[in-house]
Amino acid sequence: MDGFEGTNGIESQLVATGLSQMMSLLKDLLTQVDPKFDSFAQKGQFPSWVKREDRKLLQVNGVGSDIIVALDGSGNFTKVMDAVHAAPDYSMKRYVIHIKKGVYIENVEIKKKKWNLMMVGDGMDATIISGNRSFIDGWTTFRSATFGKNYKNTNI
């Protein structure tokens, strides 16, 4: 498993066993979910666990942003990572980064201290972030996840 290279094996085995048990439990739980809950997004609704302020942000096309990234220089930054670095650490309120249309060739890594980030693009086919790290080059999936404490993104 990625991230456990160089360990004596017991850690990897314990995590693998725990993940296997968790996957089994999740599969059992998913069989009990009412299919009507699968239609939230299709009807423009949100599950009850999505906070009211986040619903507003996700529903509005012209989301208000704290900072803008634009390749053409019309925003505050031209690189996504520069905007991430500018975001406050341990923020208790949502911090919205609007990433304008374009192909951003960079590796975006969000550190643990960057809380409540929300990245909003101009559309799934319009705002693209593409890094160049791969397993063949020695990179693992351990540090490749796109999430953090209360992290959200949309239209990217």
Image (cartoon, rainbow, N blue to C red):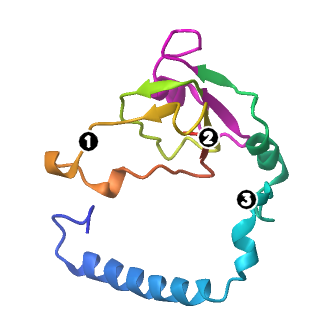
Q: Nearer the viewer, residue 103 or 53?
A: 103
Which mark is nearer the camera, 3 or 2?
A: 3
Q: Earlier in the sequence, mark 2 or mark 1?
A: 2
Q: How far is mark 2 from mark 1, CA to CA? A: 23 Å
**x and y percent of residue 13 in the render?**
26, 82
Circle 2 Cα neighbour tier, 10 Å, few/some/many (<14 / 14–19 / ≥20)? many
Residue ID for mark 2? 117
Residue ID for mark 1? 133
Q: Amino acid at mark 3?
A: Gln
Q: How far is mark 3 from mark 1, CA to CA? A: 34 Å
Q: Could you tell me which residue is drawn at 23 percent across and 46 percent down? A: 134
Tag 2 secondary structure:
strand
Which mark is nearer the camera, 3 or 1?
A: 3
Does the residue at mark 2 contact the one at mark 1 (Cβ under 8 Å)? no
Circle 3 Cα neighbour tier, 10 Å, few/some/many (<14 / 14–19 / ≥20)? few
Residue 80 bears which disc, if any? none
**x and y percent of residue 140 in the render?**
25, 54
Within the image, what quadrant is residue 20 found in?
A: bottom left
Q: Could you tell me which residue is drawn at 25 percent across and 69 percent down? A: 1
Q: Nearer the viewer, residue 47 or 45?
A: 45
Verify whether residue 64 appears in magenta: no
Q: Is residue 30 above or below residue 52?
A: below
Range shown magenta: 69-98
Residue ID for mark 3? 42
